Amino acid sequence: MAKFIFVTGGVTSSLGKGIIAASLAKLLQARGLRATIQKFDPYINVDPGTLNPYEHGECYVTEDGAETDLDLGHYERFLNIYTSQANNVTTGRIYQTVINKEREGAYLGKTVQVIPHITDEIKRRMLLLGKDDKYDVVLTEIGGTVGDIEGLPFIEAVRQLQWELPEEDCLVVHLTLIPFLRAAKELKTKPTQHSVRLLSENGVHPDILVCRTEEPLNNDIKRKIAQFCNVKPEAVIEAADASTIYEVPLMMLREKLDVIALKKMKITDYNEPDLNRWKGFLDKLKYPKSKVTIGLIGKYIELQDAYKSILESFIHAGAMNECKVQVVNVHSEFISNENVGEKLDGLDGLLVAPGFGHRGIEGKIVAVRYARERGLPFFGICLGMQMAVIEFGRNVLGLADAHSTEMDPHNNNPVINMMEEQKKITKMGGTMRLGSYPCILKEGSLSAEIYGATEIAERHRHRYEFNNDYLEQYENAGMIASGVNPETGLVEIIELPNHPFFIGVQYHPELKSTVENPAPLFVHFIAAAKKYNEKRLSVKNPLLHSEMI
């Protein structure tokens, strides 16, 4: 049986439970332990698949096709391992399972209640990943904050496990806030005390307190927190604000969070932490040698979490190229033929982001044309790839009404059409083409060169595809299908060979980008943007460019 660490939060949301959990797991992994993380969310949706990005941020997709919370993206990016459907559980999924069992008669006529039936199902899923000897430590992040009414069953399940499991097999880390009142020039511990008291009233006693703070915590404050929250002073961990989330594991290493956790769990067989690759990545990230500006064309730009994996992929790819990637958000709804030059002026690359629905579509198409005609590096993901296909159909093939049946179901040139297996589906949740699928790359194509292979597998989340009835027309005109699914013939990648970098992909490469293995397409896209930037600077100021070289 693995050991279990539960990460809870108090005072306020958005303190970074996912980052703290991922950082602790990274440190344990760096010491030679097999660690994984799971997220338990208290909302009643079965999964985030039908949630609006403005509500919940991006929907992260795992290899096995689970639509999950975006924190699983952080887990994979930090640990460089795959998560699965078992790593994300919601209240909706718990209740759905219990109700299905009740309908089947599994409870033999007993009254079904939150305790024990709901909490038993929560506990079963909490322990699931630790039962097959695959992991030494399983970390569980409990969504929301202590005191939320919808989170009470999860807290109760943790309480029961604290009582049921051997003391050294169950550890609770509580993340809280130490606010700094600038008017009084004082750090205040009272919110943390109240948060721990509320947690204790629910029967859960934290072993370690991680305190988010804008100012350093001195020893007197740590002792005060320890005394009034009933933990040892060394178990009060300072979590200061960081310039990047990728600094947090090293900050937690300096605070000895991993050492304290190992001691409390009575784990003695571990190594010195090996974080050389992580530190090398951070050095490149913090001390870039160049800079590029990338335009992110999207429709959910008001909420950065809507494109979280894309933004993190830019960070990974930028570090690989020793280049700072400055992302400029451009709302596609406000791009037109009249202002596109003004909106996209000064960019070194253009990424057209995924999305759903007709809003902002024409702006994306205009932006794609701008990039294609001016040799500006272009990268389209999912809907972005489909917009590139539509734009090429309209402006190169002369199919003036080329469109997608998602936006125009009755159009005469549906170059993007709904997949056959999707046409009979009526329910929205969990019914798209989801998860990892194989792709065969055309030898000699830029895509094959980028991946260094002709067979790959990438993750998908879509209902619509390139209409192969038009494939011959497109390839004759210069847009090739450089990646195709070997089983269905689905076009996975399109590219323009005579363009510096013009690639659209039906899948989501950002979902597999990690610190240690950045997504190849992002790495080469940023490399192409660097070349474009150098060319742009040389044209604008030849003397300055020669001095830079």
Image (cartoon, helix red, strand yellow):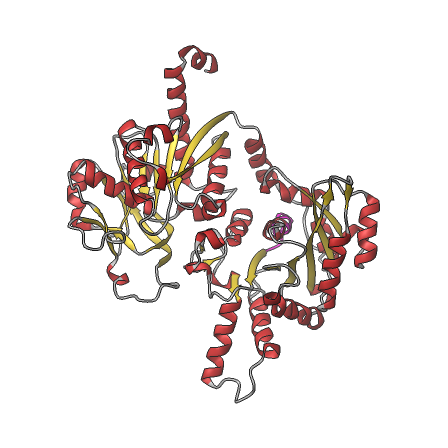
Q: In the depicted view, which residue is nearer to us: 533 or 198? A: 198
Q: Is residue 344 visible to us here?
A: no
Residue drawn at 35 percent across, 31 percent down: 377
Magenta residues?
Answer: 24-34
Percent across and percent down for residue 269 are: 69, 55
Q: Is residue 56 left or right of residue 7?
A: left
331, above or below 47, in the image: above
Q: Could you say which quadrant of the image residue 284 lies in?
A: top right
What is the residue that sits farthest to the bottom in this orientation?
A: 109
Q: In the depicted view, which residue is nearer to us: 216 or 506? A: 216
What is the residue that sits farthest to the top in this orientation?
A: 543
User: Which quarter of the figure is the N terminus placed in?
Assistant: bottom right
Queried whether the magenta region covers residue 27, the answer comes back as yes
User: Which quarter of the figure is the C terminus placed in?
Assistant: top left
Percent across and percent down for residue 276 are: 60, 38
Percent across and percent down for residue 546 are: 43, 12
Q: Is residue 300 left or right of residue 128?
A: left
Residue drawn at 82 percent across, 44 percent down: 219
Residue drawn at 19 percent across, 45 percent down: 402
Q: Is residue 239 visible to us here?
A: yes
Queried whether the magenta region covers residue 285, the answer comes back as no
Percent across and percent down for residue 522 are: 41, 38
Q: Is residue 7 left or right of residue 73?
A: right
Q: In the depicted view, which residue is nearer to us: 467 or 55? A: 55
142, above or below 94, in the image: above
Q: Could you say which quadrant of the image residue 218 lies in?
A: top right
Principal SS element in the magenta part? Answer: helix
